[in-house]
Amino acid sequence: MDRFDQQLDAAVRKFDAPVCVGLDPHWKWVCAEAPDPVEAVRSFSLRAVEGLIGRVPTIKPQVAFYEALGSRGVAVLEEVVETASDAGLLVILDAKRGDIGSTAEAYAQATLDSDGPTGAHAVTLSPYLGPESMAPFVHRAKVGKGVFVLVRTSNPDSGPWQADTGIAERVAAWITETNQQMVGVGRGPIGAVVGATHRTEASFWRERLPNAWILAPGFGAQGAGVDDIRPLFQSDGGGALIVSARGVLYGPSGIDFDGFANRVSRFVDEVRSAR
């Protein structure tokens, strides 16, 4: 099996679209007045996936919205991942897992293993517990899976722990070193999450992550635009995967599948123009 970074590069080139659509079934829009919230989330999620097949390379389901619905919600997540994967979409599970020892191993089995309950192509990770917490996921990155480690997140209050302490820079250095050990030259399967909302820091993080794919949430509804994401791309026009969720999934008044195709096309065109 190709490494995840190779799979991602091929998928992005196939669609000429370095984009990822976040699958966030917000209850206030999806479940409002629904007699069965779980079925409402299922219907919404599968319809969104159907509309993205053949148009974008990747999706990013937000695990929390499914887990909060209990066992039936988790079953919906598993169905969504399987449906998307079978249709050729690369699935990045937005789970932000992070733990040590046997617990980290269990998280890796649950999110990434093909014979596990979810079997996603990649997963987001919180590195606060140190390199030990990353080890089971790095092991799987050697056999075709991918990870995106939180470095500089898009939320406004991330600065005190990320930008102002040096922790994020140490995480970026670890990503760079780990990729180099795994692949030598070129981008590796250990990616980084860097929010597209930090325009003044974009070049800084791109320089410190020379061999990593950057997963960049925050485009659209969170305020980031074309000028914000341009510095995240490398000289070959690659290396960055731009995420939009609400800006693609929802219209001004909530669910609007009539305008869905146009929002997807606009998102792809805007990101293409930034390279």
Image: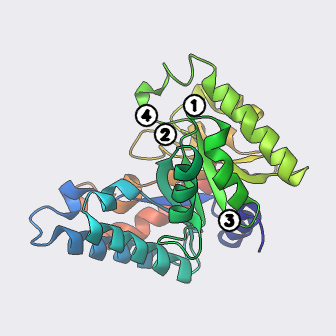
Q: Earlier in the sequence, mark 1 or mark 3?
A: 3
Label 4 vs label 3, nearer the camera: 4
Separation of residues labelled 1 and 3 (CA atoms)? 23 Å
Q: In the rendered image, which quarter is residue 58 located in? A: bottom right
In the shown orientation, is residue 64 left or right of residue 33? right
Q: In the rendered image, which quarter is residue 169 located in? A: top right
Q: Is residue 209 visible?
A: no
Density class for disc 3 (Cα within 10 Å; few <14, some 14-19, many ≥20) is many
- Residue placed furthest toward the bottom: 86
Which mark, residue 12?
Answer: 3
| Secondary structure of the residue carrying numbered label 4 | loop
Q: Earlier in the sequence, mark 4 or mark 1?
A: 4
Q: Amino acid at mark 1?
A: Arg
Mark 1 lies on residue: 199
| Secondary structure of the residue carrying numbered label 3 | helix
Closer-to-camera residue (67/133)? 133
Q: Earlier in the sequence, mark 1 or mark 2?
A: 1
Q: Which residue occupies 69% across, 64% down?
A: 8
Density class for disc 2 (Cα within 10 Å; few <14, some 14-19, many ≥20) is many
Residue 14 locus on image (x, y percent)? 70, 73
Image height check: is 166 above or below 21? above
- Residue placed furthest toward the right: 185
Separation of residues labelled 1 and 2 (CA atoms)? 8 Å
Q: Amino acid at mark 2?
A: Ala
Residue 153 locus on image (x, y percent)? 51, 36
| Secondary structure of the residue carrying numbered label 2 | loop
Closer-to-camera residue (57/34)? 34
Q: Amino acid at mark 4?
A: Asn
Separation of residues labelled 4 and 1 (CA atoms)? 13 Å
Label 4 vs label 1, nearer the camera: 4
